[in-house]
Image (tube, rainbow, N blue to C red):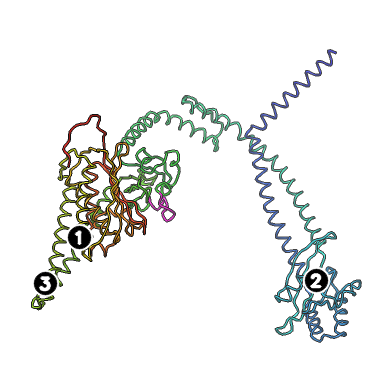
């Protein structure tokens, strides 16, 4: 029993040693180098072998195809016999295909243009002569007039089928079907592949033995270098790598020792510079993006992240052209090399659209080598919008003033040329001149109002007003106009009905009555202008939380959806011809918007073509806790 126990312990120790040796072997760089050499050699041999085998296979098939191709004299004889089309022709064609000497060909079949089998090479299949051929490929060749070759296989082996059209002049009189066995071809290819595989395995074994000796000489110095590198990574720069020779590994060890000393000297300087740079970048009001010489982002500060709506982790190592959203027409290296300023649009077409001015500067070393670039992003959204608005405003003013001035000049010239003598035409010309002059005066006055609002010189005379009674008082004036027009029975006056839904609640808000009256009058006048004859204008007043909402709806033609966001722009008209004909300046809604915004409110419109428009005015409202006495309008 004791002997058996000792033998078991010995076996266990041997197994532990084997497992330890196997673990070391799998984790050793020596094994990895050996495996890499073997894999590289095997991959190279296999690639070459695959290419060689493929080429040899294709060449063998091409040669075999040429071998089984019938001689031209044979095809000419078959064509002549098909043209003659007689019983003797069938016997002659059978004799030709039977006597044809080619050991690779196992079957020859001649078919005329009507898909009738006229001759076969096998004596066992003579009964098929005179029957229709059911081979689709033969019919396709007769119809197309082109040679067709294909490799097929069945239970008996692999075959090459070649179908050649027989032509007499420009007419296709039939086709010849040739079938040949490819067993010898594939057997040769298989033997060559086995020989190549055997040679590859022998080469891999030889490479494995050679790589083990090579890797063993490299392993020891590298292991020591790794240990010293780990100490340096932990902050210990005192260790030195032992130099065994003056070869590449010895030079690497000496370079590592020098590097360790320099790292120790510059570590503190680099850390201090990094902290200072991070502090500067984080407190800048402009966005800063630094790239390497390939144009990939290496540093991006917080402001640039906010501008571009991106996180630093998502931007690092990405091309700066991709981060700026410039598309494929710009490459990062082109941006760096050109150093040209550009404008970048972020969130284009949305309410958060931002326009950034991007300027690029190269980062150069003392030697002049370009190691990267710095892109500075400056928010110029407001500047660009103001410039566009100014240009648009000047253009609109010029256009709007030019139209009445041109009209006035034309009528005055007509009067100067003698029209003033005509008692019928002269008053009409003078009336048009007066109307156009008054329209220009109204336009200039509106422009002055907008200018004062833009400069902030207009002061609101605020007072507490019962807004319900205030709106009702304004609507009473329009009701009186309706009654007056109906009483006069003017045929040209438009008939309309004003429907009220104001409620009975007293809503006290602080407004400038004159300015707010101007806003409501403008919207009501627009509703009357664009409403059809006999239409209804609905005015509704509601209290929602801390807002008073006034809506004025008409039954006119409505405003196109694409124009809704522009109707409050200066000089913008959805129906330009009709607005000018009715004397509009195109500034009423722009002034209304400025007045409502000055009151801390909002104005907007909702419309659908053919269903009228609704304008909304929302003003701040604070419910009264105690009932006080206020002067009502």
Find residue 85 and report its horizontal and vertical position in percent.
82, 85
Find residue 394 and report its horizontal and vertical position in percent.
21, 58
User: Does the CB distance between marks 1 and 3 fall below 8 Å?
Assistant: no
Looking at the rendered structure, the secondary structure element under dot 1 is: helix
User: Does the CB distance between marks 2 and 3 fall below 8 Å?
Assistant: no
Find residue 603 and report its horizontal and vertical position in percent.
28, 47
Q: Residue at x 17, y 35 (%)?
A: 630
Q: Is residue 58 visible?
A: yes
Badge 2: few (under 14), some or many (20 or more) residues near its Cα, within 10 Å?
few
Q: Residue at x 28, y 59 (%)?
A: 530
Numbered label attached to residue 134: 2
Q: Is residue 380 visible?
A: no
Q: Residue furthest right?
A: 124
Numbered label attached to residue 487: 1
Query: Label 2 to label 3, Cα distance in Å?
Result: 100 Å
Q: Residue at x 72, y 76 (%)?
A: 143
Q: Is residue 27 left or right of residue 280?
A: right
Q: Is residue 100 left or right of residue 548?
A: right
Query: Label 1 to label 3, Cα distance in Å?
Result: 29 Å
Start-end of magenta stretch: 325-336
Q: Is residue 473 left or right of residue 103?
A: left
Quarter placement of the N terminus? top right
Q: Nearer the viewer, mark 2 or mark 1?
A: 1
Q: Residue furthest left?
A: 421
Numbered label attached to residue 427: 3
Say if the magenta span includes residue 473. Answer: no
Mark with earlier residue (2, 3): 2
């Amino acid at each position: 029993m004791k002997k058996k126990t000792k033998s078991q312990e010995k076996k266990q120790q041997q197994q532990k040693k084997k497992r330890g040796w196997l673990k070391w072997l799998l984790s050793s760089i020596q094994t990895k180098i050996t495996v890499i050499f073997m894999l590289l050699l095997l991959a190279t041999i296999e690639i070459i072998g695959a290419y060689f085998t493929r080429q040899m296979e294709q060449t063998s098939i091409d040669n075999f195809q040429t071998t089984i191709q019938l001689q031209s004299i044979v095809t000419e004889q078959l064509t002549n016999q098909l043209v003659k089309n007689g019983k003797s022709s069938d016997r002659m064609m059978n004799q030709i295909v039977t006597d044809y000497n080619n050991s690779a060909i196992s079957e020859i079949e001649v078919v005329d243009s009507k898909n009738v089998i006229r001759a076969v090479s096998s004596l066992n299949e003579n009964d098929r002569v005179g029957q229709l051929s059911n081979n689709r490929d033969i019919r396709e060749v007769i119809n197309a007039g082109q040679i067709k070759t294909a490799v097929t296989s069945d239970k008996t082996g692999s075959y090459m089928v070649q179908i050649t059209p027989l032509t007499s002049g420009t007419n296709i009189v039939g086709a010849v079907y040739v079938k040949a066995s490819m067993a010898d071809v594939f057997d040769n290819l298989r033997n060559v592949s086995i020989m190549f595989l055997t040679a590859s395995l022998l080469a891999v074994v030889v490479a494995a033995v050679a790589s083990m000796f090579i890797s063993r000489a490299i392993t020891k110095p590298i292991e020591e270098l790794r240990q010293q590198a780990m100490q340096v990574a932990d902050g210990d720069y005192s260790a030195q790598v032992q130099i065994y020779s003056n070869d590449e590994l010895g030079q690497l060890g000496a370079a590592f020792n020098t590097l360790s000393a320099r790292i120790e000297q510059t570590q503190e300087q680099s850390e201090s510079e990094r902290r200072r740079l991070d502090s500067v970048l984080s407190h800048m009001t402009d966005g800063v993006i630094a790239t390497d010489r390939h144009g990939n982002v290496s540093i991006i500060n917080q402001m640039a992240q906010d501008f571009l709506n991106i996180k630093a982790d998502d931007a690092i190592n990405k091309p700066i052209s991709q981060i700026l959203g410039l598309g494929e027409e710009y490459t990062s290296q082109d941006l760096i090399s050109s150093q040209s300023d550009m404008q970048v649009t972020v969130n284009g077409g949305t309410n958060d659209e931002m326009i950034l001015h991007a300027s690029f500067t190269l980062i150069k070393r003392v030697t002049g080598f370009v190691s990267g670039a710095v892109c500075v992003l400056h928010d110029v959204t407001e500047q660009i919008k103001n410039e566009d608005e100014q240009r648009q405003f000047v253009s609109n003013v010029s256009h709007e003033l030019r139209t009445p001035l041109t009209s006035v000049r034309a009528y005055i010239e007509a009067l100067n040329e003698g029209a003033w003598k005509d008692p019928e035409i002269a008053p009409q010309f003078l009336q048009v001149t007066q109307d156009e002059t008054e329209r220009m005066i109204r336009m200039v006055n509106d422009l002055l109002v907008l200018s004062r609002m833009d400069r902030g010189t207009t002061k609101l005379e605020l007072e507490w007003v019962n807004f319900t009674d205030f709106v009702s008082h304004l609507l009473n004036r329009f009701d009186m106009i309706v009654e007056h027009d109906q009483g006069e029975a003017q045929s040209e006056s438009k008939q309309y009905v004003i429907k009220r839904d104001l409620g009975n609640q007293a809503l006290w808000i602080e407004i400038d009555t004159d300015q707010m009256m101007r806003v409501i009058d403008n919207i009501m006048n627009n509703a009357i202008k664009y409403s059809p004859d006999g239409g209804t204008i609905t005015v509704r007043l509601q209290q929602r939380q801390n807002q008073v909402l006034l809506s004025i709806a008409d039954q006119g033609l409505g405003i196109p959806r694409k124009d809704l966001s522009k109707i409050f722009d200066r000089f913008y008209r959805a129906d330009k011809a009709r607005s000018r004909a009715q004397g509009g300046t195109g500034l009423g809604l722009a002034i209304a918007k400025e007045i409502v915004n000055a009151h801390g409110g909002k104005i907007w419109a909702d419309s659908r073509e053919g269903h009228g428009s609704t304008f909304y005015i929302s003003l701040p409202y604070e419910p009264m806790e105690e009932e006080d006495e206020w002067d009502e309008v």
